[in-house]
Amino acid sequence: MQSEKQKFKTEVVLDGLQNPWGVVRLPDGRYLVTERPGAVKIFDGKNVTTVENTPPVLARSQGGMLDIALHPDYEKNGWIYLAFSKPFERDSGLTAIVRGRLSGTKFTDVESVFDPPAGQATGGGNHWGVRMVFDGAGHLFFAIGDRGHRPDAMNPAQDLSKVAGKVHRVRDDGAVPKDNPFVGRREAWPTVWCYGSRNIQGMAFRPGTGQLWAVEHGPKGGDELNVIRPGLNYGWPVVSFGINYDGTRFTDKTEAPGMEPPVIHWTPSIAVGGLAFYDGELFPRWKGSAFVTALAAQHVVRLEFDGDRVVHQERLLERTGRIRDVRVFGDGAIYLVYDAPGRVVRITPAE
């Protein structure tokens, strides 16, 4: 296959998965893959095994077993993080995070990292978030969606006392950092890093900058790429480039004082999924590019930058399936998680 700058090929790493959501590659070469209905699978190159003792999930619509991440010091401490839709009473749910270790095929030493407030759990199956990323200073960032609330005055994204519609920052054990922007404000949830998000699906640190970037779903139009900064308001649902799915408008504003505009937006929506920056050695002409997956539009977007501006977009792998996530591991290859057909695909240079 040929992009504008690189020849590449794809190969299926693992097939036959049920709505896979996230993937990590262990130092020994094995893969861990989450499946939205609730399972975590281990793949050693030949055999697929289900991990035992993972937390129960509320597998409804967009909810279930979602993201997976390794602690930056995994080789020393063995921590594996799982983000999922936690079930509560009255068939409600909210996004939660635990960590544990892998002992054979069992998830052990399980600890809660973010246990959401039961009083904020809601019904419905949409807009859980959730991506997890670590910085280099012992912090875990994760996003929780607005849980599918209507874009009106009751939407939780603008309410600092609610955990939904936010990016959060905690220590790797779940403790609240004292320098979080809203710590000490009585009405604010202390883990909140920034607010005003609809449903972030991809987050990644841009190499060499310390910047956290994110992509999030708009409604009918208005998918966004943002630089995530502490304390800022990203506008949902007061401002948006999208409209309701029935074609009506919920706001006439695409910008407002005190609200951060997106770096770019995709209108009509492509249904953004994962986000990764490429800093490996296998694809020298892609170095510095960002890759964004698209679910509904069924392709990968490669972004080129001039500073913080996107100056070029290229579509790759069009009409190959609903692509949920993109990862770059230590081998320098690019990995894609396809929601449908359920598979993990590796991209490497063509000869």
Image: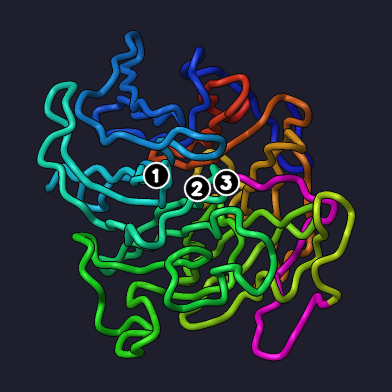
Asked whether 97 or 41 is in front, the reply is 97
For the record, the magenta segment spans 253-274
Disc 3: which residue: 126
Q: Judging from the image, what secondary structure is the residue with disc 3 in?
A: loop
Would you say residue 215 is visible in this rendering?
Answer: no
Name which of mark 2 and mark 1 comes first in the sequence. 1
Using the numbered discs, state the Cα–Cα distance from disc 1 to disc 3 in whole angstroms.
17 Å
For label 1, the crowd category at 10 Å Cα-Cα, with few meaning under 14, some 14 to 19 and many 20 or more, is few
For label 3, the crowd category at 10 Å Cα-Cα, with few meaning under 14, some 14 to 19 and many 20 or more, is some
Disc 1: which residue: 90
Residue type indicated by callout 3 = Asn
Q: Position of residue 228 (x, y in %)?
A: 53, 71
Residue at 25%, 48% (x, y): give it.
98
Residue type indicated by callout 2 = Gly
Q: Is residue 33 above or below residue 252?
A: above
Q: Is residue 224 left or right of residue 189?
A: right
Q: Position of residue 171 (x, y in %)?
A: 24, 66
Residue at 54%, 82% (x, y): give it.
232
Q: Which mark is residue 123?
A: 2
Q: Position of residue 265 (x, y in %)?
A: 76, 62
Using the rendered view, name the quadrant where residue 297 is placed: top right
Asked whether 175 or 45 is in front, the reply is 175
